[in-house]
Amino acid sequence: MPNHNTLKIEQSCRQLIKSFEKQISWEWDGRFETALAQFNVKDKEWAHKIIENHMGNIWVAENKKDAPAVIKDTIKSLGGLEPGQKLYTSAIDDNGLILCAWWPWGNGETISIRIGIIADSLSEEENKELDQMLRTWFNL
């Protein structure tokens, strides 16, 4: 287990999962080491509300230049932010942060979200353990 307090992150993730319960199905995205879900664009309002209730920061192409370094690095690792894409994040603290990448598809009908954890203070091995914990919380 990572050598830091993951309880707050776990509680936040579990609350987020519960909010989406039975609304969407999750799968593991090994490319970004995140939980991934897709839903119809007609459901975007309830999804926005759930995510905004759990994460206080929204980063878009227009404000990403004002983001802290960890957020800029995260945006870069996700391939940037195109118009319509968003990166929601929890508050940054020593234990890391929870992120949600919001990516509308080009077909105009589908949106995918990716939930992950960023913990810059951890070693690579500890981050892998944290990823495994995330998978466990999402039952993936």
Image (spheres, rainbow, N blue to C red):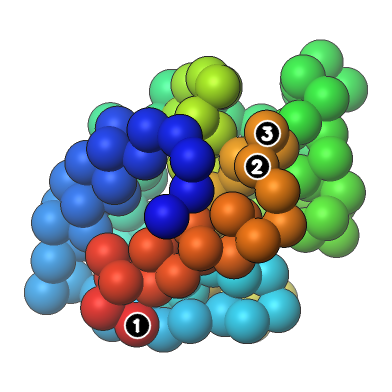
Q: How far apart, in angstroms, are the residues tagged by discs 2 and 1?
A: 22 Å
Q: How far apart, in angstroms, are the residues tagged by discs 2 and 3?
A: 4 Å
Relative depth, front residue between 81 and 1? 1
- Residue under the point 53% across and 20% down: 93
Number of the label disc, if any, that sits on residue 140: 1
Left or right relative to 54: residue 95: right
On the image, which quarter does residue 87 sit in?
top right
Can residue 48 be seen here? yes
Question: Tag 3: residue type?
Answer: Ser
- For mark 3, does the 10 Å Cα neighbourhood hold few (<14), some (14 to 19), or many (20 or more) residues? few
- For mark 2, does the 10 Å Cα neighbourhood hold few (<14), some (14 to 19), or many (20 or more) residues? some
- For mark 1, does the 10 Å Cα neighbourhood hold few (<14), some (14 to 19), or many (20 or more) residues? few
- Residue 101: image x %, image y %? 58, 54
* Mark positioned earlier in the residue sequence (2 or 1): 2
- Residue under the point 65% across and 61% down: 125
Residue bearing the label numbered 3? 121
Number of the label disc, if any, that sits on residue 122: 2
> Which type of secondary structure does the marked residue at label 1 adopt?
loop
Can residue 40 be seen here? no
Q: Of the residues tagged 3 and 1, which is closer to the observer?
A: 3
- Residue under the point 68% across and 33% down: 121
- Residue 108: image x %, image y %? 58, 73
